[in-house]
Image: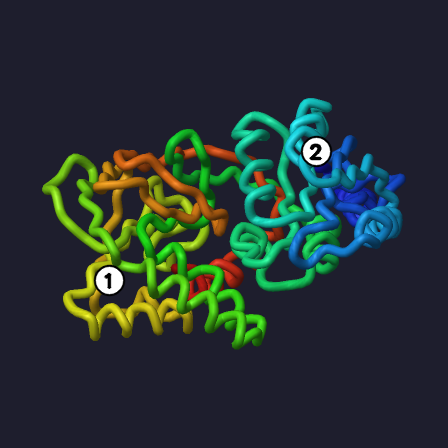
Amino acid sequence: MVPPEQAPDAAVAASAAPPRHWNQESRSTVGGIVRKIEVIVNTASGSVGPGAPAQVEALLAEFGVTARVRAPVGETLTSELRAAVDAAPDLVVVLAGDGTARAAAELCGPDGPLVAPLPGGTMNMLPHAIYGKVPWQDALRTLLDAGEERRIGGGVVEGRTFLVAAILGAPALWAPAREAVRHGQLPLALRRARRAWRRAFAGRLRYALDLGARGKTEALTFLCPLASAALDNDAQMLEADVLDPADAAEVFRLAFNALMGDWRRDPSVLATPCRRAKVWASGRIPAALDGEPVLLKSITEVDWRPAVARILGPPAIQAAGIKAATAERVGP
């Protein structure tokens, strides 16, 4: 208990004290928890240009923050990303595509550096789920000005981590066409849609959720709490969506809804929570993990992990609004 005669002085001292995590030599509110920063910039990525490394350095300088900025070229991207993580920084900032963002979170893991995946690719599933659909400059300013650590869970399939969504089956092929629609590139979207249509729904998947009854379906998606409208942020499970159109008309409707972003409202989609799934098919399974296309084995498993990475994201109140918007956009 503070004596009454000391209370006014204590109040003045408290009001003059710097905010939590404030670094007296920096305008950044993360200055007290982040001292060493590594930045990876892929200048060849979808929405990143050759001037991006200098822009990153200039923006960091506005906040009194310095960092080592790496701009790897071609095949050196993976090795430079690993070198950045191995340098044991407090924070790894990634300005690149979905594959690099996912790989950075995977390399850092739950006990490694904080990760800040900025939107530098085409789909930007992870950055948009964390910072909202904003330019990378705005996302970087947000985390420097009011960034908060978030420990998040995610899924694992064949040793690969996903923090937003995994799409298994031929509908994963619709993702590039949908992104072209979003960017107003209709001729490109049409070409991609034709290619996806030729390959879509060519073979059914078999699956079992949480060791339950076996089923057959055209495709499966698994949403993490970060992107699921049906799960709280603290939920310890995935949202599994079974996509099972009954005939050609439903196939067409689901494909159209996938392009428009309303696929989860389609009546042929059944959603249920799960922690583990086994999926198998007659051949290798096309998939997309946080927007990154991959080809999985004919028999694979999807598992929930309660802690996969430490993300430097926006304040909690802002994050709640971002999640609500993200849940409407995530899909095949």
Which residue is found at the position 85% from the left and 39% from the top? 66
In-image side of 77 versus 182 (left or right): right
From the viewer's perspective, is residue 159 above or below residue 231?
above
- Where is residue 93 drawn, in percent x and y? 69, 41
At label 2, counting other C-alpha atoms closer than 10 Å, the crowd grade (few under 14, some 14-19, many 20 or more) is: few
Q: Is residue 203 left or right of residue 51?
A: left
Apparent side of residue 104 relative to residue 95 in the rendered image (left or right): left
Callout 1 amino acid: Val
Q: For the point 26% across and 48% down, which residue is it?
A: 273
Question: Which image quadrant: the N terminus?
Answer: top right
At 64% from the left edge and 30% from the top edge, which residue is drawn? Answer: 113
Visible residue check, residue 91: no
- Give the labeled residue for mark 2: 76
Of marks 2 and 1, which one's residue comes earlier in the chain? 2
SS under mark 2: helix
Question: Looking at the image, which residue is at 26% across and 58% down?
Answer: 201
Residue 24 position, x and y percent, is 87, 40
The label number, if any, that marks residue 269 in the structure image: 1
Type of amino acid at the residue the image marks with label 2: Thr
